[in-house]
Image: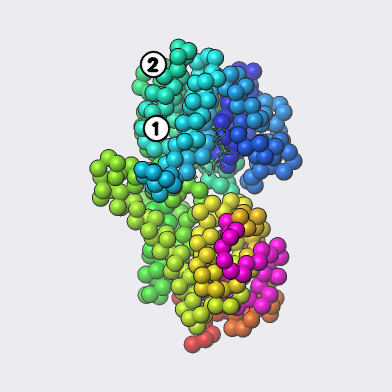
Amino acid sequence: MNKTILCIGAGYVGGPTMAVIADRCPDYKVIVVDVNVKRIAGWNSEKLPIFEPGLDEVVKRARGRNLFFSTDIVGGIKEADIIFVSVNTPTKTFGAGAGKAADLQYWEKTARDIIEHAESDKIVIEKSTLPVRTAAAMHRILASNSKKLHFEVVSNPEFMAEGTAIEDLQNPDRVLIGGMETPEGQKAINTVVDIYRHWVAPEKIKTTNLWSSELSKLAANAMLAQRVSSVNSLSALCEQTDANILEVSAAMGMDSRIGGKFLKAGVGFGGSCFKKDILNLVYLCEYYGLPEVAAYWEGVVKINDYQQRRFVNNMIRRMFNTISGKRIAVLGFAFKADTGDTRESPAINICKMLLEERACLAIHDPQALDNAKMDLDGVDGVIEYVDDPYEAVRGAHAIALLTDWKCFKELDYQKIYELMEKPAFIFDGRNLLDHAGLYEIGFNVYPLGQKAMSHLN
Ligand code: NAD
Ligand code: UGA
């Protein structure tokens, strides 16, 4: 084997990223470790702990050959030359910066594990998303070792999206690698470039200074989320003016300077990162004395909350100002299609708001029901978790479609209409369905940012 790579953190990023590296670099040994014994057992089993299209095949090709999942963190640190750190960096819930700043306790713990157990020099790579200038603190902690070992910190943020992780990792738009502007820093950058050069074209590998790399990750997520909030804010105006958000998005997107991607109106962005990364950016701006910049980015999160509230208020208003005691079929709980992940899913807030209004929920999702149960555990109200979409809609007054699963397009809506209470309402929070067809069947249809199609007035 050429070199041994260790990845600390076997989550949504560590697992798939290392599986692709091992698959594409058969000359490297790749070890992925985690403190979570159950997660590691999952990675070593037939049923992987996360659902990602194409992941099973990649893991099966490399596992046991040059890809290993283990709980032996100490052994991994001793053996590896290159250490990726891909632990979680959630929003801090306590103390200074609570609710905004990144909680770096897991990150710092790995740094201390590395100092304690390393027996040789290492390159330590920030794979987690971190506040700009974290590497400075990391350098200081690692340099405090009494063993005279040299640790070089490199930033290599991950841009994959869930649901398309394998495709994104195999064909990335870019790979970003930032390092210190010293000979050791440049050497470490080149070591990381060598890994990606196994399958990524040189022009797609961008090397920068450490701080640009750290900040580019936060900036890219903030810009993406900003597009979603921008289009969602316009969807509210469309509903007031009979403009159609699909037409507005298409017209904007045809401008090559704007581009057509990430302009889909919906119930708001979810996922583990957008909100936490923007709040982290807001915190950093406040910390560095830039309150106007902080307020600008905070607006992106505020519009996201507003869009979810707006969706629920519209449901209540359309359903004769009360949903108390009414059965509502919630189609989709994952934060987006093709994943079972529900972290920060708009469905969580929307379901809580519906339950506060005393609606009775029947939640269906092809992949996310187990997570939905955990997310709503302890929340007051009537909630059923239903594997069969036709059972979820039986006797329902309304459908709230919250995730853009393709399979929801293929349901038999004539049958669904017959199973539901009348008048039957559909609130399409993702503009996924054939609204004219549904209206013809007899539904009262409420898309987002488009004219309502109602038989009631
Ligand atoms: P995750 O929670 O799925 O996984 C993190 C893992 O790290 C967990 O399994 C946890 O047990 C483990 N861990 C925590 N402390 C540890 C320690 N001291 N030693 C060993 N293991 C430890 O998180 P994730 O979604 O994989 O995200 C990881 C990082 O990558 C975050 O900073 C996130 O912002 C970033 N990121 C995530 C995505 C995504 O799509 N989820 C994409 C790009 C970047
Ligand atoms: C996002 C980024 O796309 C990745 O580049 C980044 O690596 C990752 O965050 C991260 O740092 O965690 P992800 O959250 O997995 O990836 O999924 P996205 O496809 O970005 O979708 C995020 C949310 O925005 C979803 O809830 C999605 O439904 C919503 N969205 C997206 C819209 O409402 N409209 C759109 O046009 C696009």
Q: Mark number for residue 183?
A: 2
Instruction: Tell me which residue sits at (57%, 29%) in the image.
Output: 7
Residue type beneath disc 2: Pro
Does the magenta portion include 449?
no
Residue 117's image quarter? top right
Mark 2 residue's CB less than 8 Å from ligand 1: no
Can residue 58 be seen?
no
Residue type beneath disc 1: Thr
**Residue 237 x, y percent position in the rendering:** 37, 70
Left or right position of 264 against 284: right
Instruction: Tell me which residue sits at (48%, 27%) in the image.
Output: 111
Does the magenta portion include 392?
yes
Nearest to the observer: residue 164 or residue 308: 308
**Residue 67 x, y percent position in the rendering:** 66, 29
Instruction: Tell me which residue sits at (36%, 32%) in the image.
Output: 133
The magenta-colored residue range is 375-404
Q: Quadrant of the N terminus?
A: top right
SS at mark 2?
Answer: helix
Residue 154's image quarter? top left
Instruction: Tell me which residue sits at (52%, 23%) in the image.
Output: 114
Q: Mark number for residue 134?
A: 1
**Residue 424 x, y percent position in the rendering:** 59, 80
